[in-house]
Amino acid sequence: MPQLGNGLALSTGIISGIDSGQLVQALTSRQKQPIDQAERTKHELRIKKEEYQSINAAFASLEDSMLQLSLNATFNKKAAKFSDNEILKASPNTDAEVASYDIEVKSLAQAHKIASDKLVSVTDAFTTTDSTIKINGTSLQFETGVSLLDIKNGINGVKEETGVNASIINNTLILTSDKEGKIGRIQLEQSEGSLLNDIGLIQDNTHSNITPDDAIGEFFKSKADPSFLSTAGVITAGGLDFTLSGGETMSEIADIINSAGINNLEAFVQDDRLIVANETGQIDLVDKTGTNISDLQTPPDADTGEFAFYNTELQTIVVNHRQIDIAAFSSINDINQAFNDASGDSGVTSTIQGGQLVFDGGGGPIDIYDKVGTIAFDLGLEANQPKNVLQDATDAEIILEGLTITRSTNKIEDLIDNVVLNLTKVGSTTLDIDYDVDNTRTQIENFLEKYNNAITLVHEKSTFKRDYKIKGFTKAELSDNSSEDIEERETALRKQALSSDPLLQRSYNLLRRISYRVTDGATNGFSSLSSLGISTGSVGSNKDQTRIGTLKITDEEKFTNALKNNMADIRTLFAQEADDDEPRGKRGIAEFLKVELKNYTSFKGHFTRVAGTPNTSISSSTLDLQIAQLSLDILVKNGQLIKFQEGLLLQFQNMEVTMARLQDQGNQLASASF
């Protein structure tokens, strides 16, 4: 049985033969026209709202780019460039000075890493006594019968306190500090038992670990002669010639050598002896012509001649609570003698065997540590020193503009103001800190892209010629037509939805003014976009570009030179601020346009009041209220239409009943006549 669009059933009269469907539709067609018109208008308003929202989104995107160009940070951002990119990385902030630095990385900071001896098994018990050890001052106790795995787990259980992580590789315990530099050196102490010695983590300190190759330099020591005076001539020291006038004392000869200012070469007098030290190679001090320096070398004895040395400053060590001073530039013989001179108090004697110091405590303890300096550690004499050093704890050392600087980490934040350095490799490089031209270029190009998108969109929508024959769909038409037909119709509606719209024409004029706007108070002639080489087109440009008003970089050379040489002027052009009581022309382009765009995109902005914010389906905007009112009108009119149709159907049904009764009466009369 056929139905009207409102669901009412229709039929053809049995008695009357009248098609009630056609009759009702014909009688209600005029009442349906306002509903169809309202549905078409609602469809068109929805399209118009979406088009407004697309314009609003384009303006909001342009506003975002203006926000970036209104920030001083955009123009103050700095970038680091290197002559060798592998040596270090640098992160300057916006306050970093534009400057160039010569940097040599002499060494990188390293975390201390030590190892035990390789054991047969990681799970077998090997300790026979209880042991107490300390790692960086934190005590750990291990009972008899622990395994290497037990030791690793115990150390990792306190790594938050010690800063030391333990692992096992190839049946070997590896300890690694979580701090770079000498400050992160792992300090071990065997308080009770012999566990650290048993697994080979610490070494026996009865032998030094130095060899001649470990010396940090060579020195010449003369015989003692306080009355020595030179004769005239030329001497050679450290491969260089020095002229003596004759009659110079040892101190005066030392002054002559030092006055040459040769790096790592130093001369001085100590205990009536002339000493010349060289930290870079073997020393020589000989007569060349006419002098008597050779007299200081004869007759040779145990305290005269050329020696390797292991320190350059006076240092103090403690041996069994007895302080021993080790003079600067001490040889292995000097150190040996210093130990033996104090043996009466320390109980420790020393001999030299195979170039190493060998100590004898007479059956008693041998406790050696540094008090001033590091010579005991350097010689491997301190108690509880690691036996197997996989990676020494070293500080980073760099030379910056001729100054030698050390830090405990490769990340250095306190050397160059507002610049963080990260050292990555030993070597030399030049660090140049300059304005981040690429970043500023990117931000300006982003502005041009967003601006061109907005002005093109507004121009196309507002100047499109309207075809009044193109209408929106009714609800029934949206159901009956294919998706392709609907898309085609909506595309046509979108193109003309904002044709000749006065709000769009006003917004277009705003954008168009930017191409020729002048910033008051701009410096060095950079008062407009054209001064940067940006315009709507040069001579011979595409007429559509100049007609619409899109912007492009028309003079690349001018633009590039401005970025390289006039960043402060560009910042003024875009980001200069002005108080409310100052002329608006003083505001930079970005500052001005950012405020003007907000008048369109904000919650109470022109576009938002008309159509709501982008991607919102329902709001209190003008168009949403109109759509809501149309929906209400359609609902009311549909209700009225249904009542009217119901009334017609009731009349049709009553007519059918009446006709059926009359027909029945006629039939009865016909039957009675016979």
Image (spheres, rainbow, N blue to C red):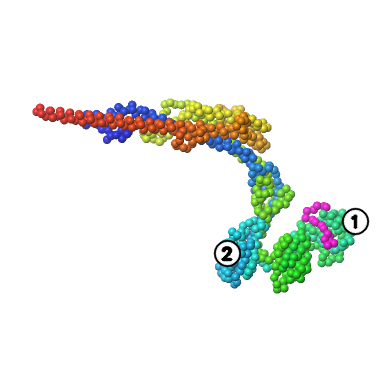
- For mark 2, what is the residue? 154
How far across and how far down the image is residue 71, in percent? 61, 38
Q: Residue at x 48, y 34 (%)?
A: 612
How far across and how far down the image is residue 204, in percent? 68, 68
Tell me the magenta residue range.
259-274
- For mark 1, what is the residue? 246
In the image shown, does 136 or 463 lie closer to the viewer? Answer: 136
Residue 293, quarter of the rendered image: bottom right
* Position of residue 177 in the picture relative to residue 633 (left or right): right
* Position of residue 157 in the picture relative to residue 428 (left or right): left
How far across and how far down the image is residue 380, in percent? 70, 64
In the image shown, does 425 or 99 lie closer to the viewer? Answer: 99
Q: Amino acid at mark 2?
A: Gly
So how many labels did they put on this image?
A: 2
Q: Farthest residue toward the bottom?
A: 363
Is residue 198 depicted above or below 276 in this figure?
below
* Position of residue 575 in the picture relative to residue 331 (left or right): left
Q: Per the image, is 107 magenta?
A: no
Q: CA distance from mark 2 to mark 1?
A: 71 Å
Q: Residue at x 31, y 28 (%)?
A: 28
